[in-house]
Amino acid sequence: MNDHPPGLRERTRRAVQQDITEAAQRLFVEHGYERTTMDDVAEAAGLSRRSLFRYFPTKEDLIVGKFEVLAETMVERLRERPLDEPAWTSLRRVFDLLVPYVDAPGKYEVAEPMQRIVFATPALLASYLEKLHRMAAAAETVLRERAETRGAPSDPTDPALPAVTGAAFSCLLAAQHAWLAGGAQETFAVCLDRAMAAVAPAGKA
Amino acid sequence: MNDHPPGLRERTRRAVQQDITEAAQRLFVEHGYERTTMDDVAEAAGLSRRSLFRYFPTKEDLIVGKFEVLAETMVERLRERPLDEPAWTSLRRVFDLLVPYVDAPGKYEVAEPMQRIVFATPALLASYLEKLHRMAAAAETVLRERAETRGAPSDPTDPALPAVTGAAFSCLLAAQHAWLAGGAQETFAVCLDRAMAAVAPAGKA
DNA sequence: GCCACTTGTGGCACCCAGTGCCAAATGTGC
DNA sequence: GCACATTTGGCACTGGGTGCCACAAGTGGC
């Protein structure tokens, strides 16, 4: 709705946001997530606690906040997939969006400790799982629309579609976990392929 | 380790716990989860805030706490399944443990609003998803052990097994959601069957 | 350049979940 | 009954998060 070339306002905001995440991640790696307070982050980022909360509404968002944007991009990509493609394949292709986030050259050193922190911190893991769940729900909606334009019944009370999309996201999570456990010796994309091949639903839903 | 016949101590504790959950659920249904404070619950249950936190370490546990026990029972049941049974089938059978919690006669009126609250409250949903994830991890461990006693390689960095167990739990979640959406016109067990049939992995992991 | 106007900032007080500590009450074993 | 362990509740404190408000800073019109 708003595609002005990014004004100065917006750019400084993004810059500050970037500064904050970097400062926060540094602190989290150094002292641990739970032992780092929002005051610490604010001080390290050079702004007031009150303003910090205007950039990141919750502490969790300092880490898992970026998935908000990702979810939207994912939905867009999903719409662009060929209409006759099986849902499972579409989802696999859409997950490629995550790849640059984890094993792009150079990104690993940053992404890896963050992911470890997420899996090690109950509150963060919970928040992350919830975000994934919302992404899955959004994906499900798109898939349902597509099924209908293709001319399918798609009973909203039938658990088949949510089950399949949910399973796909479980594979995503399993792949992420395996990638971490294996010390990133394998590509994330390879882990993802393995995980999704292991489940590979029969029904095209 | 401790199977004394439940002493008086333990019994009163359970009774109080029961009272608290009932009071809490009543308040949650009446005023909503987030607008109900722990002080409110304490007062309604007739004990001090401080003691309330000794029975339920977090507010979320007032609702999703019971899953702790459930997870243990699930693991036990999983061990009792025949060794040559495919993981997917074992998991389906184990999920039957949940059935009495949701559509036992009479339980519906209590279980249904609680589930709605969980799905409607981000914090609760997150907490619930995390518990499911832990259950899945526990199940995965058991399945891995079983695979090994059966004489299988089971590389701990292979995402196949976690993917399959994760997918199964996704089906569980989808079934629950569908059951709620359908106003419980279908049995929960039926929803579960439908969801798991829709995914039905090819590899036996 | 000044003037209105909108937007971002920081400080303050506040709410609520959760914890450590301690003294008083209450139950348990002998 | 007494000595002991456990439970309880009060209190003060931490930390995440919000509403409010006064003030600074960018923005646009002239």
Image: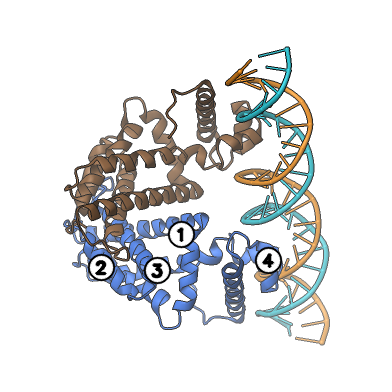
Chain colours: A blue, B brown, C orange, D cyan
* Residue at the spot of label 1: A128
User: Label 3, label 1: how many angstroms apart (C-alpha)?
Assistant: 16 Å
Q: Which residue is drawn at 33% across and 69% down?
A: A95
Same-chain status of marks 3 and 1: yes
As shown in the figure, which amino acid type bears the numbered disc 4?
A: Asp
Same-chain status of marks 3 and 4: yes
Chain of residue at mark 1: A
Q: Which of marks 3 and 1 is in front?
A: 3
Chain of residue at mark 4: A
Query: Residue B43 vs residue A76: left or right?
Result: right
As shown in the figure, which amino acid type bears the numbered disc 3?
A: Leu
Q: Is residue B187 above or below residue A137?
A: above
Q: Residue at x 51, y 24 (%)?
A: B15
User: Label 2, label 1: how many angstroms apart (C-alpha)?
Assistant: 22 Å
N-terminal-most mark, 2 or 1 = 1
As shown in the figure, which amino acid type bears the numbered disc 2?
A: Arg
Q: Do the residues labelled 2 and 1 touch (CB within 8 Å)?
A: no
